[in-house]
Image (cartoon, rainbow, N blue to C red):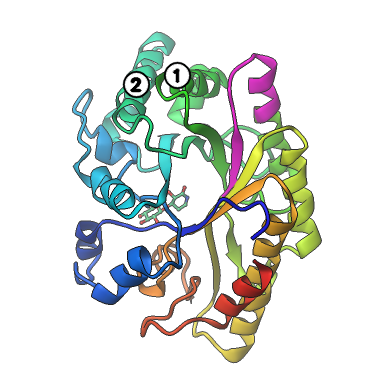
Amino acid sequence: KAGLKYFGAATDSPGQRERAGYEASYAQYDEIMWNSGEFGQTTPTNGQKWTFVEPTRGGFNYTEGEIVTSLARKNGKYLRCHALVWHSQLAPWVESQEWTPEELRKVIVDHITHVAGHWKGQCYAWDVVNEALNEDGTYRESVFYKTLGEEYIKLAFKTAHEIDPKAKLYYNDYNLESPSAKTEGAQRIVKLLRKEGIRIDGVGLQAHLVAESSPTLDQHIDAIRGFTKLGVEVALTELDIRLKTPATPENLALQRAAYKNVVGACVQVCGCIGITLWDFYDPFSWVPHVFEGEGAPLLWFEDFSKHPAYDGVVEAL
Ligand code: XIL
């Protein structure tokens, strides 16, 4: 298990499960999640996002976020907290109006002050800014960028550090798992903050991968080293490896190899400190809702039997 501090799985609250059309109660699921010893860490997949925690301006509500974070406390799991500033699952009131720079600065500072303040001391890490980059490494035209330019990134990290100085502060994004214009963009963000003396501790590689076309072991290693060289730690924060459904022996074998490569790369690079699956149970994955014709991206099938990829992960650890 080399330099890894944790191997974990993100999870949603039973209430959200129910709203998504599943049973709220899944004893076997909860047993694996909390009691089996498979996972030493968790992340709430939804409950800490802006739309839940500040649905109206100044109307802070931690009910949804507390469900998973309190289970993490009770069961002694490392907690990654997710996500303070993100263009998606943003409360409509933030998106649906024009802000002056001054107003939006206050909106961001107030949000982080309350939310990071609420969970102060409980988060091993916070995803402070999520998905700020386009595939070509330029900044995404979110309400934050349009109003403040890259200043919003500096402001978010500065504020998060002031509010919860012990949490590791991460920039988190997808498609950072092999070297590209986007990984260079993320390196640029790290350097920008460091140059200004603003704390950033880590880069989160979401690692939403595709079984049929995943990076090689060496590509993963190069991408991770590209960040650790800058003096920040790395974590795989939302790992899943989807395949074209239905699952077959062939695509499950590709998935097994892909899991082994990405987990193996993290284990082999000192400075890659943790791995989080984006849930562990296929029926609760976000993938089929978003990627047409794809699914089965996790390590447990619907009947709670394990994917071949489970053994690939074990081999890599
Ligand atoms: C996803 C959740 O898993 C879904 O339940 C929700 O409907 C949409 O968001 N990148 C992220 C995560 O940073 O927060 C996203 O999670 C997946 C992509």
Residue under numbered circle 1: 159
For disc 1, the neighbor class at 10 Å (few under 14, some 14 to 19, many from 20) is many
Q: Farthest residue in the top direction?
A: 102
Q: Residue 241: x and y, percent?
A: 56, 68
Name which residue lies at 65% across and 40% down.
233
Determine whether the residue tagged by mark 1 lies in a helix, strand or loop.
helix
Residue under numbered circle 2: 113
Name which residue lies at 74% across and 49% down.
223
Q: Is residue 229 left or right of residue 108?
A: right
Closer to the camera, 116 or 87? Answer: 116
How far apart marks 1 and 2 lie (CA) works out to 7 Å
Per the image, is 198 magenta? yes
Q: Amino acid at mark 2?
A: Thr
Q: Quadrant of the N terminus?
A: bottom right
Q: Is residue 225 above or below residue 194?
A: below
Report the span colored magenta. 190-205
Q: Quadrant of residue 37?
A: bottom left
